[in-house]
Amino acid sequence: MPHALEQDLDHILAHTAGVWDSLRGANLFITGGTGFVGAWLVESLVWANARLNLNVRAVLLTRNAKAFARKCPQAAADPSISFLAGEASSFAFPEGQFPFVIHAAANTGSFLSDIEATRRVLEFSGTHGAKRLLFTSSGAVYGKQPPGMTHIPEDYAGAPPTTDLQTGYGQAKRISEFLCASYGHESGFAVVLARLFAFTGPYLPLDINFAAGNFVRDALRGGPIRVAGDGSPFRSYLYAADLAIWLWRLLVEGQPARPYNVGSGEEVSIGRLAKIVANAATPPCEVDIARQPVPGAEPSRYVPSVERALRELGLRPLVPLEEGVRRMLAWHNASR
C-alpha cells in the first residue's frame, strides 16, 4: 500500500536536494522524534534514505517507542531507525559518534526539566562527535507581540515577563538558546536555533491548545467549528512538509548561533482560519464564533518575519494554507 504521506514526502525530497549528501553515511541523534516535529523529520529521513541510498542511521530518544510505531509504523519498522528509551533530561548516552544532533524534545509542563534536557543533549553532543546541532526553540521567546508590530523579526529584543508564571515554556526556550550558543562555542560544534511558530498538517495534535488542530477536529466530527473567542487574533501557519524542508536545510546550512524564525509570514485571523477549515471539510460545516470583537480593540498577533530564512537560505512557504488544510483533512479521513 502506498505511503499515506507520499505526496508530502516527495515534496520534501524535491526541495532538500542539497541536504542529503552532507548526511550520507552519518549517525543522527534525535530527541522529540516521536512528536509532531519529530515524526515529520523521521518520516522524511526514512523516505530520503531509501530513495537516495544514504546509509544514514538515526537513534530516536523516546519515552514510548510503541506509541511511535502506532503513529508511524513504516518509519518505526525501518532498519535505519533505532530507539533509545529514556527522558531527555536524564537519558543514558548511546555508544558511537553522532555528527548531527536534532534536539526537538520539549516539556511544556516543566521549566526545569526543559532546561535540564537541553543541558543533557549538549553534554552528549560535546562528547559524541557532534559537528552540527539543530535546536527547535519557539516564537514564545519573544513574549507578547507589541501592538503595531505586524511581524516579529529575530533581532526583536522583547521577552516574556520574568514574573509571569504562565510563560515558563518561553523562558525555558530562552535559557536553552543561551546554553546552546555558549556550549557550542566552547565545545567547537555549530548550533543552529530554529524558532518555531504555528503549523498545519498530519500529526498535528487535535486535542491540545492548537487552533488549527482543534478546528480540524471539529470539522471531522461534522461541525460546527467552535471559536472560543472573537476570532480576531492574527496567526500564521506553515504546512508540516514545508516545516521539514526548513529544518533539514537549517541543520545543514544554517549559520551557527543564529536564530531563524520558522513559520509563515502570511497572517490570517483565527476567524478566517476557522472558515478555511469549514470550507475544506466534506461536506462544508458551520463556524460558531463565541463573541463579537470589541470595537476599536487592537487584535493580538503572533506572526513572524521570515525574511532572514528567505534572504540567507532561500526558504519560503510552498504549500498554501488552504491546500495544507485540505491535505490535513484528507489524511485524517484516510486514517480512520
Image: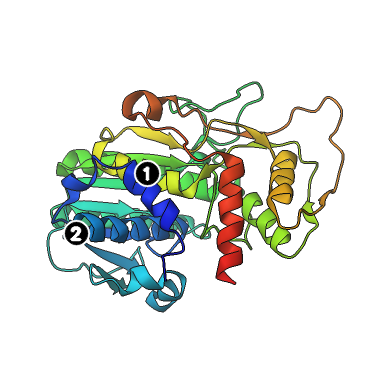
**Disc 2 residue type?**
Val
Q: How is the image coloured?
A: rainbow
Q: Is residue 276 left or right of residue 248?
A: right
Taking the spot 66% from the left edge, 35% from the top edge, the residue there is 268
Q: Which image quarter is the C terminus in? A: bottom right
Q: Position of residue 194 (x, y in %)?
A: 39, 41
Reading the image, the residue beneath label 1 is 245
* Neighbourhood count class around disc 2 (C-alpha, 10 Å): few under 14, some 14–19, many 20 upward: some
Residue closest to the eye, 287 or 168: 287
Q: Quadrant of residue 218?
A: bottom right
Q: Position of residue 80 (x, y in %)?
A: 23, 67
Assign a secondary structure to mark 2: loop
Q: Position of residue 293 (x, y in %)?
A: 84, 35
Which residue is most to the bottom? Answer: 66
Q: Is residue 155 left or right of residue 254?
A: right
| Image position of 186 with respect to 40: above or below | above
Assign a secondary structure to mark 1: helix
| Image position of 305 with respect to 39: above or below | above
Q: Is residue 194 left or right of residue 165?
A: left
Q: Quadrant of residue 47?
A: bottom left
Residue closest to the eye, 83 or 222: 222
Q: Which image quarter is the N terminus in? A: bottom left
Give me the disc on residue 179.
none
Residue closest to the eye, 78 or 6: 6
Q: How far is disc 1 from disc 2 in space, using C-alphas?
A: 17 Å
Count of numbered marks: 2
Q: Position of residue 20 (x, y in %)?
A: 22, 47
Taking the spot 69% from the left edge, 43% from the top edge, the residue there is 273
**Disc 1 residue type?**
Ile
Give me the disc on residue 56.
2
